[in-house]
Image (tube, helix red, strand yellow):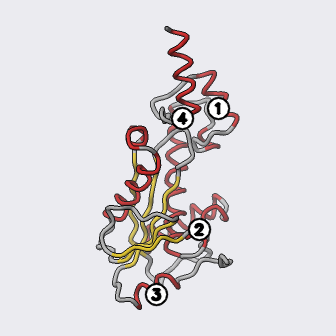
Amino acid sequence: MTKAQPDYSFEQTAFDDGATYVAGVDEVGRGPLAGPVVAAAVRLDPDNIPEGMNDSKKLTHARRVVIAAQLWERADVCLGQASVAEIDQINILHASMLAMERAVAGLSGVADHVLVDGNRIPPALKGKASALVKGDARSLSIAAASIVAKVWRDQLMVDLAQQHPGYGWERNAGYPTKEHQLALQNLGVTPHHRRSFKPVHNILYQEKTVSD
């Protein structure tokens, strides 16, 4: 049964098993049709954890922004991402693993135990790792990573929306909402769209068929 709030028990278990540097990692952006997949790795200071942390999906945007800023000040935090080109080349699952590997590798210390959201452990992680299904609702370190990654990616999509208006990325973060898919039909495909994703691929194929 999933706990109502994430706590520090998984981290403490890792310490009890001999770990000295425990980090949580999570990614955001597997489902969108546009933009990179972004991961964050976070090593918390157990004596200075921001209040109110939870799975990022259970927090308001304003609360996520506040907590993310606190995490950057109080914790060891690193972002990693895989580009649209990498997503199209190696597929979204492998790109998500790559983004998480990059986030963990960029921490200021070497994590000897990583708590990973989901049911897969990125293959290039060094040291021990534990995969936690729904980890962002169970582990404070993973919850922290989910918050940092979502805030950063959402802001990136707001910035990209200014360069490519009409798709609603400032509202949908690149996810396949009706607004976004209608704009794809009417405005076409941008360089930030994932060409390997079916709705984008289908539009490109239609355009190619028409031009042929």
**Amino acid at pointer 1:** Gln
**What is the spatial separation of the Cα atoms under label 3 and label 1, in whole angstroms?**
45 Å
Mark 1 and mark 2: Cα distance apart in space: 29 Å
Q: Identify the mark nearer the N-term, 2 or 4.
A: 2
Q: Name the residue under label 4.
A: 162
Spot occupied by residue 166 in the image (x, y as percentages of width and height)? 62, 29
Q: Nearer the viewer, mark 3 or mark 1?
A: 3
Depth check: give the residue in front, 33 or 206: 206
Tell me the SS state at disc 4.
helix
For the point 41% across and 91% down, the residue is 16
Q: Nearer the viewer, mark 2 or mark 4?
A: 2
Q: Where is residue 38 in the image (x, y as percent from the top left)?
A: 46, 53
Q: Name the residue under label 2.
A: 134
Residue underneath mark 1: 181
84 or 212: which is nearer to us?
A: 212
The answer to which quarter of the image holds residue 7 is bottom right
Decide which of tag 4 and tag 1 comes sooner along the chain: 4
Position of residue 47 in the picture relative to residue 113 (left or right):
right
Residue 194: horizontal and vertical position, in percent?
A: 48, 36
Q: Residues within 10 Å of mark 3 (few under 14, many from 20)?
A: few
Give the residue type at disc 4.
Gln
Q: Disc 2 residue type?
A: Lys
Mark in the foreground, 4 or 1: 1
Q: Which amino acid type is shown beneath numbered disc 3?
A: Thr
Q: Which of 119 and 101 is in front in this view?
A: 119
* Alpha carbon distance from label 3 to label 2: 18 Å
